[in-house]
Image (cartoon, rainbow, N blue to C red):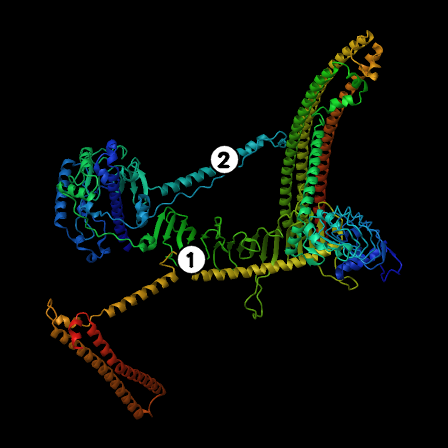
């Protein structure tokens, strides 16, 4: 509700601003170019155009304009508005009459055209002429000096600017190299062509059917989406902004849609025609035929045949003749010029009745009303917030829906700004629970993207880390309830992938170690990149620790010219032979397949050493996995804390938000204020009340001066005595009360409950404290009073008004 | 030098001693038991310690081909020998011996740490092969000439040097000299070199160092120059047109031609020879350039061929790998299923399935290989045809150019003959104005003699040209034959290897399956 009101106000504000700056610029331009302009006269059609760059265009709703009010009155506190809102000045009344007359003539002359939009009711239900609703205002923000950023600002108040279509992924076709001379011929195709054809036909048919089905579904969907052909096409009327060519290097007239801040050429098909246009000075009606939209319209407002003006001569409608005259007349003083112009006007536009718009820096930064803005798109919703509005740094949230009714959420993207952890994007995919993030920005914080279904540990989750930021080279960690997959990069041991399968948690009978009961690991799979320093046969590509089975599987990298790779499987069985000796290693504990059989690997010793090594590695991997789990918990905890309390970074130039500088500034202000107060006190005029008693304007006589001084002093004395008496009275009252209480206590001492006694005791101590303070104050007053008296006396002797008379007697 | 064990009998480094040492220093505990059980091969030993054993002669070490660390300190070794095979040696300790000269280290290119302290070495040399040398200990030797330091300049990795207790270490300038001349050294005689002292020494010796550097640079430049020239010649040889880029052939024609040289002193022959040479050299240059171009073309052709062949093989390999991976995935699941299955008929059914899968894989892989063989064969044949054609064309063109040379020679021969006969006539008529050297005049006795002489010269020339031509033709032909032979052979080897690989893999899979079968039956 509040939003709407602000919207309207702001819209008006922006309009006014634009008008103002344009007008100003226009004037400047005019002055600057006038001397050189004689040759360019044909291009500058009328002086109107030079004066007013920005026009309002409007036509009317089907209903009668006077009855039409687009403002919901209940939203606005009418009483707080200035009187110009609720009343019409005589000049305005006159203007309304003129407009009424004009409107009647118009409807008489053009009965087939819709009535004019001339005097809509304002928020106080008072008819106001449209032009007077515009008030050119210059704002202190450079952003508002140009039409594009200005209209962007306005549109932010009104509705959302549609974003560009998401870029469609460009599929780059891999370039096929030209077949080289010795490219081998493809293997002979021995399959039956006929069978293939039949098969193809069959497949084609299935595909066709599928396609047909899909197409139908799509069409149905499209039909659903596309509303019926607009029955009101060409009947609706809107307001938008027309910027006329000429000033501020605007080469061509164009339209601005205030809702989207987009500019359109006047030849755009969306604009079907113009009924009328206005600015803060005049109102014109289009007399040209709009059969071909606005493409053929001539925007020469000085041409009375094409544009019927309402007020004569507010601005020179025509053109060159007068302009030439003016060239001769005025070259320097614009105000002068304006005055002259006003003189020969038959009727000029009354000043705008609206209050000057004010946009505080705060509001300007907030942009949208309340700093929040929601825009709905087909199947999506975009929410925007001003920076620092949300204390978690959230500035933008895009919600994508699956259906047109926007009930099923597909994914949510949240953008953040100014966060101390430099989190920039959070991406939640509701369908898969996972998501792929965009590449990270250059300054790498620890944890850039985190997609999840739930913040609970051991659930589906993907965490991505910036490259090179982690010592262990981890770049991504994926989790599902029973697995954890980690991806590494750039490690010296060439580890690139670790996948852990967990088994169901074993319930411990004794829950003494409550903090951690990790799930048992069933399987750890690790993959390694090729280490070029080792021969492929000795370079492990994948190792699988089947922990429960005590089995370790190794797969080595494939040699360059081979298609199979070596494998080795260790199965540790601690067995005892017939003599009771422990069997250390037997050939069946290591099953190897070697592409190129090697000698040394046949040795039990080698196998034994490899196995021992692997056992150690297994321990390390398990430990690593366990640490990873802990880390996840830690990160989740941290995340939660972060979500609770975000620290936002604040630029040192942001004086408003930077606490330190704020404190400093406030301290400075306080000091200044105190200084000021002191000054005020020192300038306090003791004599003022007594001087006021004397007849004003007369010169002070000596007698009067002496009396004045005496009166002042005796008054002060009296005040001091009064003060002492007051303190004395309070002291006595307090003492009496205490005595009463003590008496009461002594009488009732036996029957008192301990609480009452406590109460009494605390009262006593407080009362004693008060009495002591009062005593001190009285003593202090007694000490200070004579000094104060003397000080005043001296001050009075030195007072410039009395000094001449009093001195003599001193 | 008197040592406590000098009195003891020298010992021989025999197999037993080595075996004992290896076992002693080999793996311990459980691994040791295994090692004992199996025995350790000498070539698997990486490190060996043979100190305080009174060894006189290094011997029997040739089997330790993978040895990286060898300690022979505190023996009575007199010569460095028997280490030629230990090319992987990184660490060699020969300190506290009786060595008098550095030798026998020429094959130890990987050596990084060499200790020769407490010997009787007088001169640092024979270390050129040790390009990776980082630590050199020569303490307590008899090195007396400070110029030995200069020799160490070539070891760019050398960081630690010990030369204390040598005669040179007593010289006043010893340290300064080393600081200045070995700027990359970090430790000298167990101490880190002080940067300031180093700078000071450098300044002091700057002049001589600069001069030496200049000499070294010159030497390097010369060596590089020579190398470049050798390389160029090699390239030309590959194109079979070496030394045809100048008058080399022409000069060689006259180098053994006694008569021809004699005849050149005849009047008019000089100019004739000059023009002949010019024309001849031009033709040679033509051959040279043509040969280079052809060589380039042949190489390009060969490169394309190799590239295409490699591409085809790689693609085929990828396909094979894919098939194997797919099979393995499926196979693993099947095996697991079999392990968990308890019903015997079901097990058997599944085993048969698995076995069928393996056979299928075999067929698929073999088909792929057969396909590749066919493809390659065809391509190789095309290449063979093309390269043979190219070589044929090259030979033809060179031959026609050589024919031009012969024509020139014939023409020249005729001219010479004419001049010779004219001169003979003049001499016979005693109209000869100029004096001819006696040996030349001796030719002009009668017509036969002079014609023979001119003819002999001509024959020699033709022979030279023919020889060069033959050389070129044989060279390129044998190159071509070798190349094609190599390609065919490689393809056969490749094919064999692949077939072997497939068979091996399939056998392994099958035997794994069989083992599983047995195991299961036993389990049940």
**From where the camera sits, is residue B522 visible?**
no
Q: Nearer the viewer, residue A532 or A166?
A: A532
Q: Secondary structure at mark 1?
A: loop
Please determine whether, in this image, residue A418 is positioned above or below residue B255.
Answer: below
Please determine whether, in this image, residue A164 is positioned above or below residue B35.
Answer: above
Quadrant position of the C terminus of chain B in the picture = bottom right
Please determine whether, in this image, residue A157 is positioned above or below residue A212.
Answer: below
**From where the camera sits, is residue A125 visible?**
yes
Q: Is residue A802 left or right of residue A142?
A: left
Q: Position of residue A506 (x, y in %)?
A: 58, 64
Q: Secondary structure at mark 2?
A: helix
Q: Which mark is residue A205?
A: 2
Residue at image coords 44%, 37%: A212
Q: Which image quarter: residue A293?
A: top left
Q: Nearer the viewer, residue A57 or A147?
A: A147
Q: Are marks 2 and 1 in contact (CB under 8 Å)?
A: no
Please determine whether, in this image, residue A368 is positioned above or below residue A685.
Answer: above
Q: Earlier in the sequence, mark 2 or mark 1?
A: 2
Q: Is residue A659 left or right of residue B95?
A: left
Instruction: Kindly identify which residue carries mark 1.
Output: A649
Q: Is residue A277 left or right of residue B69?
A: left
Quadrant position of the N terminus of chain B in the picture = bottom right
Residue at image coords 43%, 38%: A215
Mark 2 belongs to which subunit? A
Determine crowd level at label 2: few under 14, some 14-19, many 20+ residues with C-alpha closer than 10 A: few
Q: Position of residue B156 (x, y in %)?
A: 69, 48
Q: Position of residue A579 (x, y in %)?
A: 79, 63
């Amino acid at each position: 509700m509040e939003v709407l009101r602000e919207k309207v106000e702001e819209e008006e504000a922006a309009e006014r601003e634009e008008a103002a700056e344009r007008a100003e610029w226009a004037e400047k331009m005019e002055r600057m170019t006038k001397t050189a302009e004689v040759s360019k006269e044909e291009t500058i059609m009328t002086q109107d155009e030079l004066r007013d760059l920005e026009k309002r265009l409007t036509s009317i709703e089907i209903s009668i304009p006077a009855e039409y009010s687009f403002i919901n009155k209940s939203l606005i506190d009418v009483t707080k508005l200035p009187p110009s809102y609720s009343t019409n000045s005589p000049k305005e009344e006159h203007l309304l009459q003129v407009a009424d007359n004009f409107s009647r003539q118009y409807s008489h002359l053009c009965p087939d055209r819709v009535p004019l939009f001339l005097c809509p009711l304002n928020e106080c239900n008072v008819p106001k002429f449209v032009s007077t609703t515009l008030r050119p205002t210059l704002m202190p923000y450079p952003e508002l000096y140009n039409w594009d950023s200005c209209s962007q600002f306005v549109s932010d108040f009104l509705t959302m600017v549609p974003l560009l279509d998401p870029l469609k992924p460009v599929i780059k076709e891999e370039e096929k190299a030209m077949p080289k001379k010795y490219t081998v011929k493809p293997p002979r195709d021995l399959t039956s062509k006929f069978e293939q054809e039949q098969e193809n036909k069959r497949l084609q048919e299935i595909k066709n059917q599928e396609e047909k089905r899909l197409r139908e579904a799509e069409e149905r969907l499209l039909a659903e989406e596309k509303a019926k052909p607009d029955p009101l096409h060409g009947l609706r009327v809107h307001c938008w902004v027309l910027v006329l060519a000429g000033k501020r290097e605007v080469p061509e007239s164009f339209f601005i849609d205030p809702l989207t801040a987009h500019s359109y050429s006047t030849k755009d098909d969306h604009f079907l025609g113009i009924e009328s246009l206005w600015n803060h000075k005049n109102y014109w009606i289009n007399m040209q035929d709009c059969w071909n939209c606005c493409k053929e319209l001539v925007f020469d407002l000085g041409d009375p045949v094409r544009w019927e003006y309402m007020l004569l001569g507010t601005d020179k409608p025509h053109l060159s003749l007068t302009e030439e005259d003016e060239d001769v007349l005025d070259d320097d003083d614009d105000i002068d010029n304006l005055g002259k112009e006003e003189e020969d006007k038959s009727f000029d536009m009354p000043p705008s009745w609206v209050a000057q718009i004010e946009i505080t820096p705060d509001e300007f930064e907030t942009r949208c009303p309340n700093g929040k803005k929601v825009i709905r798109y087909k199947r999506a919703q975009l929410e925007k917030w001003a920076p620092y509005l949300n204390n978690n740094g959230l500035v933008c949230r895009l919600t994508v829906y699956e259906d047109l009714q926007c009930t099923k959420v597909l994914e949510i993207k949240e953008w953040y700004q100014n966060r101390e952890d430099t989190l920039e994007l959070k991406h939640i995919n509701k369908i898969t629970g996972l998501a792929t993030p965009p590449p990270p920005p250059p300054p790498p914080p620890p944890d850039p993207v985190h997609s999840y279904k739930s913040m609970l540990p051991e659930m589906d989750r993907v965490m991505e880390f910036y490259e090179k930021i982690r010592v262990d080279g981890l770049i991504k960690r994926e989790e599902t309830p029973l697995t954890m997959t980690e991806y590494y990069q750039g490690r010296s041991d060439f580890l690139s992938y670790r996948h852990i399968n967990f088994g169901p948690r074993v319930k411990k009978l004794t829950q003494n170690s409550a903090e951690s009961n990790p799930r048992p690991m069933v399987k750890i799979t690790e993959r390694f990149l090729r280490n070029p320093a080792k021969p492929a046969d000795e370079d492990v590509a994948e190792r699988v620790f089947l922990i429960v089975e005590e089995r370790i599987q190794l797969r080595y990298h494939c040699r360059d010219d081979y298609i199979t790779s070596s494998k080795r499987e260790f199965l540790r069985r601690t067995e005892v032979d017939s003599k009771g000796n422990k069997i250390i290693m037997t050939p069946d504990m290591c099953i190897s397949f070697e592409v190129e059989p090697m000698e040394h690997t046949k040795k039990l010793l080698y196998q034994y050493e490899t196995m021992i090594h692997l056992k150690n590695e297994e321990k390390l991997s398990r430990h690593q996995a366990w640490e990873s789990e802990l880390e996840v918990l830690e990160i989740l905890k941290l995340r939660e804390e972060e979500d609770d309390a975000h620290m936002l970074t604040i630029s040192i130039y942001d004086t408003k938000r930077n606490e330190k500088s704020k404190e400093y500034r406030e301290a400075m202000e306080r000091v200044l204020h105190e200084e000021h107060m002191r000054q005020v006190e020192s300038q306090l005029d003791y004599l003022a009340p007594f001087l006021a008693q004397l007849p004003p304007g007369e010169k002070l006589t000596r007698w009067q001066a002496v009396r004045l001084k005496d009166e002042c002093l005796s008054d002060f004395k009296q005040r001091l005595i009064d003060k002492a008496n007051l303190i004395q009275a309070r002291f006595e009252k307090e003492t009496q009360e205490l005595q009463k209480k003590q008496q009461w206590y002594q009488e009732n001492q036996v029957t008192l409950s301990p609480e009452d006694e406590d109460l009494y005791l605390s009262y006593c101590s407080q009362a004693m404290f008060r009495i002591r303070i009062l005593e001190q104050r009285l003593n202090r007053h007694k000490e200070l009073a004579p000094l104060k008296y003397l000080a005043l006396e001296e001050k009075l002797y030195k007072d410039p008004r009395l000094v001449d008379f009093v001195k003599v007697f001193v | 030098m008197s040592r406590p064990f000098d009195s003891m009998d020298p010992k021989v480094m025999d197999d037993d001693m080595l075996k004992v040492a290896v076992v002693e220093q080999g793996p311990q505990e459980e691994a040791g038991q295994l090692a004992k059980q199996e025995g350790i091969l000498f070539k698997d030993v990486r490190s060996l310690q043979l100190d305080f054993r009174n060894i006189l002669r290094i011997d029997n070490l040739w089997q330790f081909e993978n040895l990286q660390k060898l300690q022979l300190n505190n023996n009575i070794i007199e010569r460095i020998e028997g280490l030629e095979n230990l090319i992987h040696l990184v660490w060699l300790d020969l300190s506290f011996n009786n060595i008098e000269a550095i030798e026998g280290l020429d094959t130890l290119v990987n050596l990084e740490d060499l200790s020769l302290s407490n010997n009787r070495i007088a001169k640092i040399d024979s270390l050129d092969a040790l390009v990776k040398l980082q630590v050199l200990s020569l303490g307590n030797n008899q090195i007396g000439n400070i110029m030995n330091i200069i020799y160490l300049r070539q070891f760019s990795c050398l960081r630690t040097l010990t030369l204390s207790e040598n005669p040179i270490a007593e010289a006043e300038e010893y340290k300064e000299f080393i600081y200045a001349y070995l700027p990359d050294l970090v430790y000298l005689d167990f101490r880190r070199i002080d940067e300031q002292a180093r700078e000071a020494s450098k300044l002091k010796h700057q002049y001589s160092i600069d001069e030496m550097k200049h000499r070294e640079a010159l030497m390097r430049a010369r060596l590089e120059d020579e190398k470049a020239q050798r390389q160029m010649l090699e390239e030309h040889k590959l194109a079979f047109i070496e030394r045809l880029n100048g008058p080399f052939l022409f000069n060689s024609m006259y180098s053994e031609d006694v008569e021809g040289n004699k005849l050149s002193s005849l009047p008019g022959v000089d100019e004739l020879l000059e023009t002949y040479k010019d024309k001849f050299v031009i033709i040679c240059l033509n051959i040279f350039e043509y040969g280079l171009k052809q060589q380039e073309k042949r190489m390009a052709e060969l490169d394309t061929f190799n590239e295409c062949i490699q591409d085809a093989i790689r693609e085929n390999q990828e396909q094979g790998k894919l098939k194997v991976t797919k099979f393995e995935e499926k196979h693993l699941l099947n095996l697991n299923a079999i392990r968990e299955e308890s019903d015997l008929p079901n097990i058997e059914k599944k085993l048969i399935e698995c076995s069928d899968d393996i056979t299928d894989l075999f067929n698929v892989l073999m088909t792929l290989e057969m396909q590749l063989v066919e493809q390659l064969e065809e391509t190789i044949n095309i290449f063979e045809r093309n390269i043979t054609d190219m070589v044929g064309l090259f030979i033809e063109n060179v031959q026609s150019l050589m024919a031009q040379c012969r024509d020139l020679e014939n023409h020249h021969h005729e001219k010479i003959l004419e001049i010779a006969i004219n001169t003979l006539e003049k001499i016979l008529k005693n109209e000869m104005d100029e004096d001819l050297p006696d040996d030349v005049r001796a030719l002009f006795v009668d017509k036969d003699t002079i014609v023979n002489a001119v003819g002999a010269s001509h024959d020699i020339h033709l022979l030279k040209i023919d020889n060069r031509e033959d050389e070129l033709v044989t060279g390129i032909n044998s190159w071509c034959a070798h190349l094609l032979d190599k390609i065919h052979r490689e393809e056969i080897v490749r094919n064999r290897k692949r077939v072997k690989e497939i068979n091996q893999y399939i056998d392994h899979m099958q035997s794994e399956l069989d083992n599983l079968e047995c195991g299961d039956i036993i389990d049940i």
